[in-house]
Image (cartoon, rainbow, N blue to C red):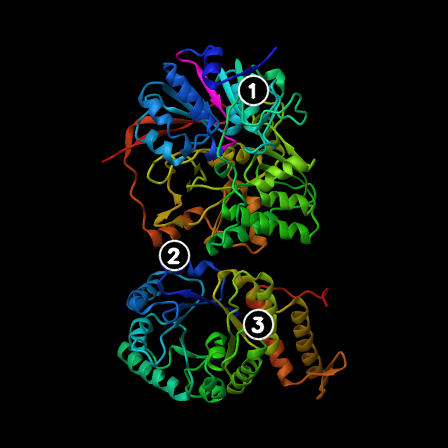
Amino acid sequence: MRRSLLFLPGNNPNMLINAGYLGSDAVIFDLEDAVSPAEKDAARILVRNTMRYMQLDCEKIVRINSVDTAYWKADIDAILPEKPSLLLLPKASSPEDVIQVASYMDEVEEKLGYANGSVGIMPLIETALGVENAYAIAVSSSRVKALFLGAEDLTADIQCKRTKEGREIEYARTRLVVAARAAGVDVYDTPFTDVNDDEGIVVDAKLAKSFGFTGKASISPRHVEVINSVFSPTLAEIKYAYDVIEAIETAKKQGKGAISLNGKMIDAPIVARAERTIAMAEALGIERRDDCE
Amino acid sequence: MSKLVKSIKEVVELVGLKDGMTVSFHHHLRNGDYVLNMVMAEIAAKGLRDINVNASSLFDTHAPILEHISNGVVTGIAADYIGAGVGRAISEGILEKPVQFYTHGGRASSISLGRTPIDVAFIAAPTSDPMGNCSGKYGKSACGSLGYAFADAMYAKKVVVITDNLVPYPLTDFSISEDYIDYVVEVDAIGNPKGIVSGTTKITRDPVGLVMAAHAAKVIEASGLLKDGFSFQTGAGGASLAAAKFLKDIMVEKQIQGSFGLGGITGYMVDMLKAGCFRTLMDVQCFDLTAVESLRENPNHQEISALQYASPSCKSAVVDSLDVVILGATEIDTDFNVNVHTDSNGYIMGGSGGHSDTAAGAKLSMIIAPMFRARLPIVTESVTCVSTPGQTVDVLVTQGGIAVNPRRKELADNLKSAGLPIIDINELKEKTERITGSPKKLNRGDRVVAEVIGREGNLCDKIYSVSKK
């Protein structure tokens, strides 16, 4: 389960040491934008040691530097041995970017004696070209487990103003969700960057969920609880999911082909969604309640 | 008759101060206070020696007292709190006799019982009339409540009001009344308003502090105490204030009306009063201007004395009716004993204040502290100083889990049922030490520099000098 992904600067020991206590499902240790060129090596060591020695109760992802820099191979050399679940690859604009990184990961994994593909890639789509190539990127390597939208760089690239309302990224959001779902991978929404706007984050997270994103990233621990809440199934959604499964089972017993619930047809995607909802509710320890609408 | 005296110098003559006597001060002007220094300068100028100073607190602004100690003018100190500046010199052994540390309730109680008699109380008053009816609510140096000064006024042999806002007789909205006052002195300024109260106390923005605050609010919600009639005290630290904010959200959403908010009052408690979370605020000390204004304007915001707040020898005290208190700690040990007097190197940098009083009185006493500060773990095998005994502390909230005192099994069960991350305090200590390492035991000096007096007058612990080895 990956509702919230929290960016933590790779060069900030006080934040790294508390990484496991901030409530996010995943942390993204950042070696890229948060770290100045002079501190790249120090951040690499700090992140490596945090992963090696700290027992963190959340998933660990690392944002390495992009393939147009001199740092990305050294990042992989340092980080891959610590088995992050994913590497977040910034400025992924084409399938070639991903393939280049995946090939190098093959080499490093072989040297380490790790199973090939043990660490996944999450391309960060933050260029106009990347948006247009989203599906090709998503299917470029079996390592790609999810797409990730980065709206700040994207809006700079498409030469428009980034707003809180986010009309300017509607196309990119839709395009990424469709591409990711077509490729059968997850998809994560860009952070809401005003850390003082407690209401804005609620609106933005709900919007992302309505687009179909799997979860949402954050640059502030203050946003984590809201994101977790928005991307958790509601009691009504959980009740509906159980109703769907019960309707399916009842229909099977009765030998019925077409199944309906509350007058609406139930088909395979609805059943799949119901199963995902129940799995998530169980993981979160939320019990079914029938007294909710 | 006239009680007005022209100067502090003159009043020091008039009250008949002699070598070996005890003078007292309150700390409502906090780090902006001028009065203690002005009075002690005149006492020194008069050539008096061997004076005991009984102050409800000493702040860094009172550093000139160190010179009086070096010169033999001051040879005894009693206080409920001593800031790091003066505290460091005490820890290094500047004073021959150990400092007597009281709690706010214990100090008032001891004064009222005559255990710590005061010869002359000097009361800084932001407003007074010529007969000594005085208040902290008005004037350029307004500090709000004068709660800690009541016992001094009521029981000292002589009482002097020192004010920088003399108003015509009678001041009707007084806190302390003329029947206790011997003399009134007008001065240019009793304090620096910037140091007296802060503009607005801010809740923490530190993510770890916010995680702890959210845990704290959930602990209160799950404790079973959060219902109509609920009463609450919290400190002025950033995480405590954030917990109050989260608690307010829960109370407003569930439409719970509490009975009272207690303590040092901040703007956040005033917000809770305005939002209908409490029927009243019981205020022994104002921490910010919002609280001062509320005390002045809102009849449901009530000033109380330290005796009523927390004295164990009064017929009743508000702390005994308190449901929940949120407190801090510099260290807490695996028996839940809490240190708020010294830092981890053994230097005095605080004091109990109302810590032990409220922990003893409240149905749920909660400590909020991070697992570590800088490189130092907060949970230790044994604290450097027992400020508040572990049997009065119920729960420790950290970012890495919530430890419940084994004496409160039913509370632990409630919190577990609510899905809160409960952890054994020993396990929490180990978990922290996996990150910080285990600190070396402190090499303390061989001199006792302070005695911590429990609220009932018992010796709770001794603080030793800091070894320079």
Mark closest to the chain's N terminus, 3 or 2: 2
Question: Which segment did they paint magenta?
Answer: B19-29
Where residue A287 sits, quadrant-wise, is bottom right
* Viewer-proximal residue among B330 and B74: B74
Q: Callout 1: helix, strand or loop?
A: helix
At a point 37% along the width and 36% down the height, the residue shown is B384
Q: Callout 3: helix, strand or loop?
A: helix
Within-10-Å neighbours for mark 2: few <14, some 14–19, many 20+: few
On whether disc 3 and disc 2 are found on a single subunit, the reply is yes
On whether disc 1 and disc 2 are found on a single subunit, the reply is no
The residues bearing labels 1 and 2 have C-alpha atoms spaced at a distance of 48 Å
Q: Nearer the viewer, mark 3 or mark 1?
A: 1
Q: Callout 2: helix, strand or loop?
A: helix
* Viewer-proximal residue among B409 and A215: A215
Within-10-Å neighbours for mark 1: few <14, some 14–19, many 20+: many
Q: Which residue in the structure is indicated by mark 1? A: B153
Provide residue B106's location: percent of width, then percent of height: 51, 25
Provide residue B461's location: percent of width, then percent of height: 40, 29
| Residue B414 appearing in the image | no
Instruction: Say if B219 sits above or below B9 in the image.
Output: below
Q: Which residue in the structure is indicated by mark 3? A: A279
Q: State if disc 2 and disc 3 touch (CB < 8 Å).
A: no
Instruction: Say if B240 sits above or below B140 in the image.
Output: below
Q: Is residue B148 left or right of residue B36?
A: right
The residues bearing labels 3 and 1 have C-alpha atoms spaced at a distance of 67 Å
Q: Which residue in the structure is indicated by mark 2? A: A14
Question: Which chain is mark 1 on?
Answer: B
At a point 31% along the width and 79% down the height, the residue shown is A109
Q: State if disc 2 and disc 1 touch (CB < 8 Å).
A: no
Identity, as a three-letter code, of the amino acid under mark 3: Ala
